[in-house]
Image: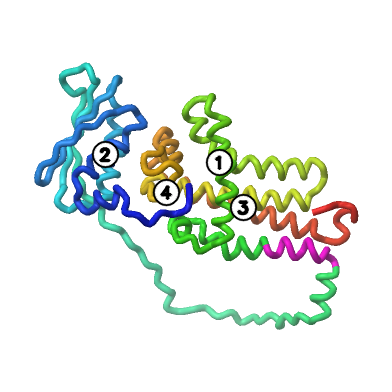
Amino acid sequence: MTQPDRSLTMRQRAKLGDRAAIAQIIQSAIAHKHITAHVVFDAHHLDIYLEAELTPDQQIATTLLQRELLRLHLPALTTITISGKQTVANQPVWVQELQLETAPAITTSLQQPSHAVKSTHRKPPFTLTFNDVRQFLAKFNPLKLACIACLALYGLFGASHYTVDGFLDGSDAIMMFLHGVNLIFHEAGHTLLAGFGQFLHILGGSLMQVMVPAAIAGYFVVTRQMYAGAIALCWAAQNVWDVSIYIQDAQERSLPLLGGEGVLHDWHFLLLDMNLLAQTRLVSSLVFLLGSVLYLVAIAVGLYYARASSAPKSQSL
């Protein structure tokens, strides 16, 4: 992922009805599976002929192409016929017709109960005095407490920016700066795992950008520098959030990539290979949740070891 580009994309041209762009999107959707697509248009119908050295997988091909065309929202196109065959064969091995109709959104609402039950028991009001605050803060190292407090505030107010729209908006300067740093390790991961098969080569980018700060956190824990380990764990959690943006974009693929539009989208390939592309939102949410849990753990550990008596005075940040 790089900084957002505001230029008109091929997908936008396809949504305007550009047939060449539509055909290119269809071809790009299955190109990484080494499948060639031939597209024939009609007034309200589309024929897609798929060819490969081995017969294309029917379920993967139909699911992927239907999703691609549904996202374009082309009202004139109602049905498509997809056929798959080997390159050397004369007749298709399978043929499937799909209806391009989206299911209506189902909305539910929660109604407030008509009668609210009021508690009859009242707790005495809590009073916080200046002396209470002073005594509490006296237990902490001021620099460590200030640092972990800043990280906690960023997590509280900055986590909501870790979405595709938040990235494209680019208003969170801290997120964009950290993304630039993380991108170095992301690209290094692709290079280091290039010789371990295509799946690990593609996964290596996201894996490496999380593992580098995680390994640093592990080193600090092993050497009993727990506060420093908590800070590094915050960085690792932020990388997990960063990866969740990439996963969230697996279907739409609206994020700009290094190398342009023709570059393979890591998580589009990975989720498609694992037959999880339809569960993109769930996978992204779970990864974001994992990052949030790691971040909360890091803040809790950091607060605990920010106490003035929690470590020897010689321990550094």
- Lower sequence index among marks 3 and 4: 4
Q: Secondary structure at mark 4?
A: loop
Residue identified by numbered label 1: 186
Which label number is shown at residue 256?
A: 4
Residue at 32% x, 38% y is 29
User: Is 131 left or right of 108, judged from the image as shown?
Assistant: right
Which label number is shown at residue 127?
A: none
Which label number is shown at residue 26?
A: 2
Give x and y (percent) for residue 300.
71, 57
In-front residue for pair 201/153: 201
- Lower sequence index among marks 3 and 2: 2
Residue at 42% x, 49% y is 256
Q: Of the residues shown, which amino acid type is indicated by label 1?
A: His
Residue 144 part of the magenta-drawn span: yes
Q: Secondary structure at mark 1?
A: helix
Give the distance between the C-alpha atoms of the residues marked 1 and 3, in whole angstroms: 22 Å
